[in-house]
Amino acid sequence: MPPDVMMNAAHSAPSGRMGHVWLVGAGPGDPELITVKGLHALQAADVVVYDRLACTDLLAHCRPDAVRVSVGKQAGLHSVSQGGIHALLIAHARAGRRVVRLKGGDPFIFGRGGEEMIALRQQGVPVSIIPGVTAAAGCAAATGIPLTHRDLAAGVSLVTAHRQENAVDLDWAALAADRQRTLVFYMGLAQADHVGMELMLHGLSGTTPVALIACGTTPAQRAVRCLLADLGGVALQCGLVSPCLIMVGQVVALADPDLVAWARLCREPVPVGTI
């Protein structure tokens, strides 16, 4: 961990008083999607430790004297390790401070919130969870795609397409088996071709509707719709960037055509819809 970060955690510590950590979901990108409870915690915090995916516009709501620490991660570049984040939260809490760990989406949906909660509990640090709008729910709403629908989808599964090295692969047969379920793949852009091939290999029709939604709920949102058979090729052609969700299922056909462009495999670049 950078020395200045640890020094900030240690100086001017109130003696004999344990602080508290709130794991706060900032939502998927639109700063107005944070909950009222999350905003109140942010406004009261002595220290805010925030992710790359947590909208930095929210930092304007911090107290002027609040310490702000960026611990953002992106592919191949971690400014602070996960262990370093744990140590930082613990150090500030032991110094008696009110600490907000501001995370994109919801802390418990592919946000390592569970790992941070356990690390804090093991060190006797009080921790509370303030949920946030998940990326799946936010991106679905921003494109007019209902994750569930009485006639089309009786359930929804949230799946990470990014697997740790040597991790057991997904149960593709189970994911492909239920035609009345919406599948949402997080961190899926680089794995789009693999996702499409595995689902079809395990029985899901290549004509199943699919949507790719990048930078959802933000002014930079881009969204395209295609068939499962075309997923890998369309992901390459459209020039989308992460963070990007892949939604698979019949409900995708209900997407707002003004918000989601229809894409087919072709030699020319595919126009990408915006909001």
Image (cartoon, rainbow, N blue to C red):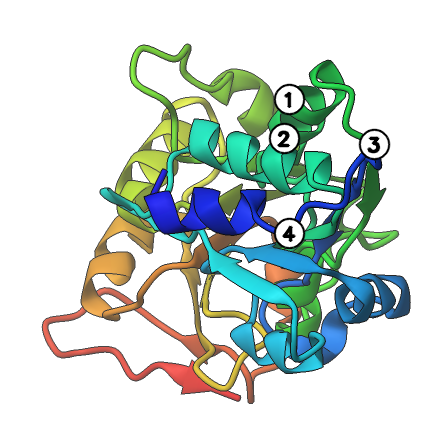
Residue at image mark 4? 12
Give the class, few, some or many, for how many residues have Cα within 10 Å of label 4's Cα (few <14, many ≥20).
Answer: few
Examine the rendered structure and indicate whether residue 85 appears above or below residue 43.
above
Amino acid at circle 2: Glu
**Residue visible at 76% across and 45% down?**
14
**Residue 257 picture location, percent across and down:** 56, 83
Q: Position of residue 116 (x, y in %)?
A: 63, 30
On residue 119, the disc is: 1
Q: Secondary structure at mark 2?
A: helix
Is residue 46 visible from the viewing direction of this image?
yes
Identified at 10% across, 72% down, the residue is 267
Q: Is residue 136 left or right of residue 216?
A: right
Query: Where does label 3 land, which residue?
Result: 126
Q: Nearer the viewer, mark 4 or mark 1?
A: 4
- Which label belongs to residue 116? 2
Q: Residues within 10 Å of mark 3 (few under 14, many from 20)?
A: some
Instruction: Specify the amino acid type for callout 3.
Output: Pro
Residue 80: percent from the left, percent from the top?
A: 37, 42
Name the N-terminal-most of marks 2 and 4.
Answer: 4
Asked if the residue at tag 1 contacts the one at tag 4, i.e. Cβ–Cβ closer than 8 Å, the answer is no
Q: Find the distance from the CA under tag 1 to the CA under tag 3.
A: 11 Å
Q: Are marks 3 and 2 in contact (CB under 8 Å)?
A: no
**Which sits earlier in the primary sequence, circle 4 or circle 1?**
4
Mark 1–mark 2 CB contact (< 8 Å)? yes
Q: Decide: marks 2, 4 in contact (CB < 8 A)?
A: no
Mark in front: 2 vs 4: 4
